[in-house]
Amino acid sequence: MRNNVKIGVVILAAGSSSRLGYPKQLVDFKGKPMLQHIIDVADSFEFGTEVLVLGAAAKEIKDKIEPKKFEILFNQNWQEGMASSIRAGLEKSLEKEKDLEHLLILLSDQPFVSKQRIDALIKEQLASNSEATFSEYDEDVGVPAIFSSSVFPYLKELKGDHGAKKLVYDKKIQFRTVKFEKGNFDVDTKEDVELLKKLEKE
């Protein structure tokens, strides 16, 4: 990666999309599934490890994407929520590279994630030597986010449907932020899909 710093990436794509009624990972965005968009953006970097976590509708999703360099990991406990996918993704990443120094976490339903956004996160994380660097939007923090190895033990403790942002409050880790306009837009409902079709033309 950068100056031989070992950075891994995990894409979380195991959710059931219960509110939408079909896999939001496969919602079309600029001519390709949203998940494929995230894979393609991440694939433009040279990460040390690349893990894609699937769960609900895994076979259907696998049949409609090109994982490129990503290793697909099926999370049998996906119904527990996001925490189980974070734990599984981190464990697999450390199996692949035990000396991993940072882990970037991406979601499959944030269509406006770009190479520039990810690059900004990584630059801030490495320049500040921070425990974590989160995206900032709507006066809140969230993913995409990158975590140093000092935070890995806390990621392994996450439970239920809590994402890594919970660490900010529970462990009070020291973190930095990078602004991400439209970072709060994700796809959960049919109305979101319709809005996405309009936004992608802007």
Image (cartoon, rainbow, N blue to C red):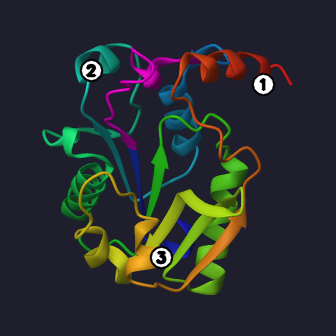
Q: Residue shown at 25%/54% (left/top)?
A: 160
**Residue 114 screen position, x and y as percent:** 67, 43
Q: Which residue is mark 2?
A: 57
**Residue 117 screen position, x and y as percent:** 69, 53
Q: Is residue 194 above or below residue 167?
A: above
Q: Which residue is mark 3?
A: 168
Quadrant where the image shows the C terminus: top right
Q: Which mark identifies residue 199?
A: 1
- Label 2 environment density (alpha carbons within 10 Å; few <14, some 14–19, many ≥20): some
Q: Is disc 2 placed on a helix, strand or loop?
A: loop
- Label 1 environment density (alpha carbons within 10 Å; few <14, some 14–19, many ≥20): few
How far apart, in angstroms, are the residues tagged by discs 2 and 3? Answer: 31 Å
How far apart, in angstroms, are the residues tagged by discs 2 and 1? Answer: 27 Å
Q: Is residue 11 left or right of residue 188?
A: left
Of the residues shown, which amino acid type is indicated by label 2?
Ala
Residue 163, visible in the rendered structure? yes
Of the residues shown, which amino acid type is indicated by label 1?
Leu
Q: Look at the image and say whether residue 9 sits in the magenta stretch.
A: no
Q: Which residues are magenta?
A: 12-28
Q: Look at the image and say whether residue 15 sits in the magenta stretch.
A: yes
Q: Is disc 3 placed on a helix, strand or loop?
A: helix
Q: Which mark identifies residue 131?
A: none
Q: Is disc 1 placed on a helix, strand or loop?
A: helix
Tell which of 30 and 24 is nearer to you.
24
Q: Residue shown at 66%/59% (left/top)?
A: 119
Q: Residue shown at 34%/19% (left/top)?
A: 61
Residue 144, by quadrant, is: bottom right
**Residue 65 screen position, x and y as percent:** 41, 20
Residue 74, visible in the rendered structure? no
Q: Is residue 25 left or right of residue 75?
A: right
Residue found farthest to the left: 76
Q: Tell me which label, 2 or 1, sits earlier in the chain.
A: 2
